Image (tube, grey):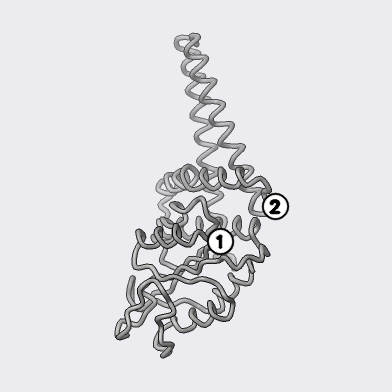
Amino acid sequence: MKKEYFAIIKFPVFVGLSLLIVLLIFFFMVLGSYHNLGLSAWGNIFYTLIFILIIVLIASWILTLISTHRKIKPRWLRIYLSWVLSHIFYHLAMWISVLFFQKKTSMQESFLYFNNEIVVTNYQGMNSKNLLLLLPHCLQNSNCKIRINNNIVECQECGGCDMAKMKAITRDRQIKAAVASGGSLARKLVKDTHPDIIIAVACHRDLTDGVRESWRYPVYSVLNERPKGPCFETTVSSSVIDFAVNKFI
């Protein structure tokens, strides 16, 4: 339990630490410039703009932290915070994690958990059927004679892999499902279906890239299991998918 807790808070702790370091570097730069040459008019403008930028970043981070526990009502603000999380805070956390010799996958996992908290807080109980369950092609049994391309309805439900369980969930809950063989196809499927919310299943790298690239959409991430190695006959728990679906419809 303690291990899982630290896995979840790792990302927000590292973002906070990186912002603190950026703030300290800024103040040392200002003090250094002031003692050596004094600050010119252009120097004052430059450091004032940098200071405003840092304050905006810190305020955005505080709002992002709040959004894990309280719904952010203005849609434009949710989209802005999602962009900052994916394009700035993610890189800050990954940068500082290198200094602490953290594994990339553990930081990606913490980022995904953190993003899930925000998605659940802002979209829980939205009662929309326009939900897309996005699945990786590697869930399918490699010996299956039917190659599922995009549409999970093609699955014959033989029970040889987890596709049949996913098909049953989408049929029972009347939600959309799509199977993607790569990032480009996943992006096209999202663009074509334009869902209110996405529940995505994939590995650390694909999920992290997908969440960041789809920052305009709320994406709830579910990591797949890889008992036979990456990209080959992976599995996913149907109870976890059920849990996620129940959160939103």
Q: Quadrant of the C terminus?
A: bottom right
Q: With 28 as the anchor, is 119 left or right in this view?
A: right
| Residue drawn at x 39%, y 59% as measured from the top left | 188
- The residue sitting at the front extreme is 192
Q: Is residue 57 visible?
A: yes
| Residue drawn at x 64%, y 55% as measured from the top left | 122
Residue type pointed to by label 2: Arg
Q: Residues within 10 Å of mark 1 (few under 14, many from 20)?
A: many
The image position of residue 101, as x and y in percent, is 40, 52
Q: Give the camera-side residue of 70 and 7.
A: 70
Image mark for residue 70:
2
The image position of residue 31, as x and y in percent, is 51, 19
Q: What kind of element bears circle 1?
A: strand
Q: What kind of element bears circle 2?
A: loop
Image mark for residue 197:
1
Compared to residue 141, the image places residue 33 above or below, namely above
Disc with the residue nearer the chain's start (2 vs 1): 2
- The residue sitting at the bottom extreme is 158
Q: With 182 as the anchor, is 52 left or right in this view?
A: right
The quarter holding residue 209 reads: bottom left
| Marks 2 and 1 close (CB-CB < 8 Å) | no
| Residue drawn at x 44%, y 70% as measured from the top left | 178
Residue type pointed to by label 1: Ile
Work out how far the residue at label 2 is from the one at label 1, CA to CA, in angstroms.
Answer: 18 Å
Compared to residue 31, the image places residue 206 above or below, namely below
Q: Give the camera-side residue of 68 and 72.
A: 72
The image position of residue 1, as x and y in percent, is 59, 68
Compared to residue 138, the image places residue 29 above or below, namely above
Image mark for residue 74:
none
Q: Give the camera-side residue of 78 and 12.
A: 78
